[in-house]
C-alpha cells in the first residue's frame, strides 16, 4: 500500500438518538445515528414506531388529513 494516501483511522464515538453511546473506529471523530441496536425493533423484539425526519407529518400535510378531519364534524352538525 502507498503511504500518505490513506485517511487516519482513529477511535470515534457513536451517539444514538435514544442516548446510547459506544466507541468504535472510523475516519470521523463523532458519528450521530437515529437508531442503534439498543433501540431497533429487530434487536429488541419490541414493536416501536420510528418517525424519521417528520415523514408522517409530511404525508398528512400532503393529503390535508387534519383539515379533512376538522371539516367533517361541521358538516354533520349543519345537517341536523
Image (tube, helix red, strand yellow):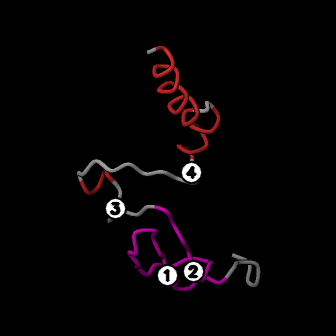
Question: In percent of the image, x 43 and y 15: which residue is there?
Answer: 80
Going by the image, does 20 lie left or right of 11? left
Q: Secondary structure at mark 2?
A: strand
By secondary structure, the bulk of the magenta-drawn segment is best described as strand
Task: Answer few, some or many: residues within 10 Å of disc 1's Cα (few below 14, many 20 plus, some between 14 and 19).
Answer: some
Image coordinates of residue 71 in percent, x first then y, are: 55, 28
Q: Mark 2 highlights which residue?
A: 30
Going by the image, does 80 lie left or right of 59? left
Residue 25, disc: none
- Between the residue at mark 2 and the residue at mark 3, the CA separation in whole angstroms equals 19 Å
Q: Mark 1 highlights which residue?
A: 13
In the image, 50 versus 8, the foreground residue is 50
Residue stretch rendered in magenta on the structure: 8-34
Of circles 4 and 1, the one toward us is 4
- Between the residue at mark 4 and the residue at mark 2, the CA separation in whole angstroms equals 24 Å
Image coordinates of residue 69 in percent, x first then y, are: 50, 31
Image coordinates of residue 53 in percent, x first then y, are: 58, 54
Of circles 3 and 4, the one toward us is 4
Residue 30 lies in the magenta-colored region: yes
- Sequence order check, earlier mark of 3 and 1: 1
- Sequence order check, earlier mark of 3 and 4: 3
Quadrant in the picture for the N terminus: bottom right
Q: Secondary structure at mark 3?
A: loop
Q: Secondary structure at mark 4?
A: loop
Of circles 2 and 3, the one toward us is 3
Amino acid at each position: 500500500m502507498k503511504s500518505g494516501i490513506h485517511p487516519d483511522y482513529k477511535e470515534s464515538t457513536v451517539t444514538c438518538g435514544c442516548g446510547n453511546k459506544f466507541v468504535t473506529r472510523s475516519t470521523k471523530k463523532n458519528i450521530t445515528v437515529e437508531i442503534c441496536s439498543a433501540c431497533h425493533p429487530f434487536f429488541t423484539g419490541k414493536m416501536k414506531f420510528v418517525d424519521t425526519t417528520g415523514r408522517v407529518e409530511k404525508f398528512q400535510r400532503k393529503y390535508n388529513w387534519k383539515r379533512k378531519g376538522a371539516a367533517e364534524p361541521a358538516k354533520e352538525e349543519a345537517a341536523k
